[in-house]
Amino acid sequence: MRKTKQKLLIKEEINRFNKLFTAEELLSRVKKTNKKISIATIYRFLKDLREKKELHSYLCDRKTIYSKEENNHCHFICQQCGETKHFEVSNLDFLKNKLKGNICHFQVDVYGVCDKCFKKEFF
């Protein structure tokens, strides 16, 4: 990948994130320094970083979010009200006997009925 001023600026902004981020959030930060950078440039750069395993991506609320870390991303989605709650899973030890290879990171979507909807239904 050829190094350009635009790519260096984008990489610097990515390094400033301390949390998950979207392409749009990255573009907003980059535009403060260089208004000529387009969303297409951002997406191409993010794709290149993902392919080189320097960046990880997940789906959240039908948007792709990115992380510099090999974090895991998990959701509980209520099938009645549609509310999505994030939760932590530290490992997938139960998969070690089922998968050959090394797990880098994972995303889990669990569907069910939240406590609030469950209580409305039965009380």
Image: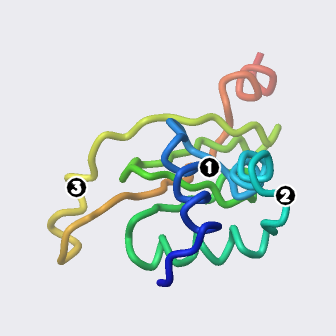
Q: Amino acid at mark 3?
A: Phe
On the image, which quarter does residue 103 sit in?
Answer: bottom left
**Counting residues from the N terminus, which is met first, the one under dot 1 or under dot 2?**
2
Residues packed near mark 1 inside 10 Å, few (<14), some (14 to 19) or many (20 plus): some
On the image, which quarter does residue 105 sit in?
Answer: bottom left
Marks 2 and 3, how far apart at CA = 48 Å
Q: Amino acid at mark 1?
A: Tyr
Relative placement, left or right, of 91 versus 23 is: left
Position of residue 79 measured from the top left corner of the image (x, y, whole percent): 74, 46
Question: At 68% from the left edge and 72% from the top edge, which residue is drawn?
Answer: 43
Question: At 70% from the left edge and 58% from the top edge, which residue is drawn?
Answer: 23
Question: At 43% from the left edge and 36% from the top edge, which residue is drawn?
Answer: 88
Residue toward you, 99 or 16: 16
**Counting residues from the N terminus, which is met first, the one under dot 2 or under dot 3?**
2
Please give the residue where the numbered disc 1 appears in the rendered image: 111
Residue farthest along the bottom direction in this orientation: 1
Relative placement, left or right, of 83 versus 99 is: right
* Element on which disc 2 rests: loop
- What label does residue 35 carry, if any? 2
Marks 3 and 1, how far apart at CA = 20 Å
Q: Are the two marked residues, 1 and 2, in contact with CB atoms closer than 8 angstroms?
A: no
Q: How is the image coloured?
A: rainbow
Q: Nearer the viewer, mark 1 or mark 2?
A: 2
Position of residue 107 measured from the top left corner of the image (x, y, whole percent): 48, 56
Relative placement, left or right, of 89 versus 26 is: left
Q: Are the two marked residues, 2 and 3, in contact with CB atoms closer than 8 angstroms?
A: no
Question: At 81% from the left edge and 69% from the top edge, which residue is drawn?
Answer: 38
Please give the residue where the numbered disc 3 appears in the rendered image: 94
Residue toward you, 88 or 81: 88
